[in-house]
Amino acid sequence: MAVAAREERRLTAIILMLLAFLLFTGIDTSAKWLVQAGLPVTEVVLIRFAGHFVIAMALILPQEGRRLFRTSAPGQEVLRGLFLVASTFLNVAALRYLPLTVTVSIFFAAPLVVCALSVPLLGERVGPRRWAAIGVGFIGVLVVTRPWSASFHWAMMLSVTALFSASMYFVMTRKLAGVDSASTQQFLTSLVAVSVALPFGLIGWVWPAIPVDWVAFALIGVFGWAGHQLATIAHRFAPASALMPFIYFQIIYMTASSWLIFHTPPDGWVLAGAAIVIGAGLYLWLRERVLARSAALTPPSLEVAAGDR
């Protein structure tokens, strides 16, 4: 089957990404609802990936056939899947105790962590300005978590650990770019996640008790598959650099869900910390664009001298 060509349709891409982030909010909202309804964390993780896996295979396998199973880096694909399932487990565990606004504010530091990890793991260069942005971003995480105050909850450490695990997932995604197809990566990641979650998720299985629990139970996997599909299509219509800033719209979705569904409005500290993290992330994005533009205009013989000033 022919691969759809890239098109320049930025407005459509932005709308699709905003819808994708709304669906991603649906994942966390469903997960929080289910763990608060008494379902084990391991079961929620299993149904999140199982639903995604079944839907993806029903749509992708008939088109791709055996090509879906071909990988040039099986070890890295497995490691990528392990980082994702670990991040998801830690995040769901944190959601049992923390408001959505806290977990998403911490997660917004992921671009900063990925930038820092790209130095030792990918051999990329990060200059003093970007290191400063990374440092400011972590100050924002400290403002959200406030480990020095009585309001600190131990589950925030689960969320911070989930942040680092998710960042490793993104680093592995970058390493695998151009190595395996997007369909193969999605298949293998969901396969690893389901395989790891299955034996743990079946222990102490609890069926939903009331209709609204069943709705969350049924939709969490659908939210995952649909969100990733929309995000994939959006990146065909616009470059990632143009779409990255819109990830921060998710704080609006998460705040609305936390407030309207769980009756937990964000406090001033969370909003201030989120603003710091978002500001650092946007500066990092702008700096990346400036450097990319500069590299495109700089003769090869001057690239090393130009550096990241």
Image (cartoon, helix red, strand yellow):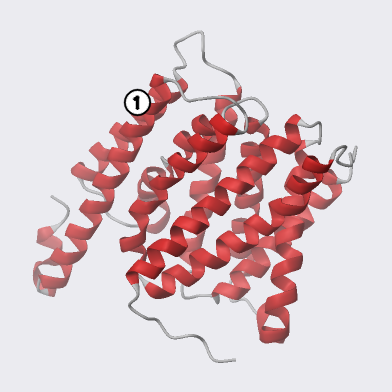
Is residue 78 in sight in this rendering? no
Residue that numbered label 1 is attached to = 272
Q: Is residue 192 shown left or right of residue 108?
A: right
Determine the residue positioned at 49% across, 34% down: 255
The quarter of the rendered structure image containing the N terminus is bottom right
Determine the residue positioned at 69% across, 61% down: 190
Question: For mark 1, does the 10 Å Cα neighbourhood hold few (<14), some (14 to 19), or many (20 or more) residues?
Answer: some
Quadrant of the image occupied by residue 225? bottom right
Q: Nearer the viewer, residue 119 or 39?
A: 39
Q: Where residue 160 sits in the image (x, y, percent)?
A: 52, 33
Q: Is residue 179 above or below residue 133?
A: below
Determine the residue positioned at 62% across, 33% down: 261
Q: Is residue 40 shown left or right of residue 239?
A: right
Quadrant of the image occupied by residue 86? top right
Q: Where residue 172 sits in the image (x, y, percent)?
A: 51, 59
Total of numbered circles in the picture? 1
Amino acid beneath label 1: Ala
Q: Nearer the viewer, residue 34 or 158?
A: 34
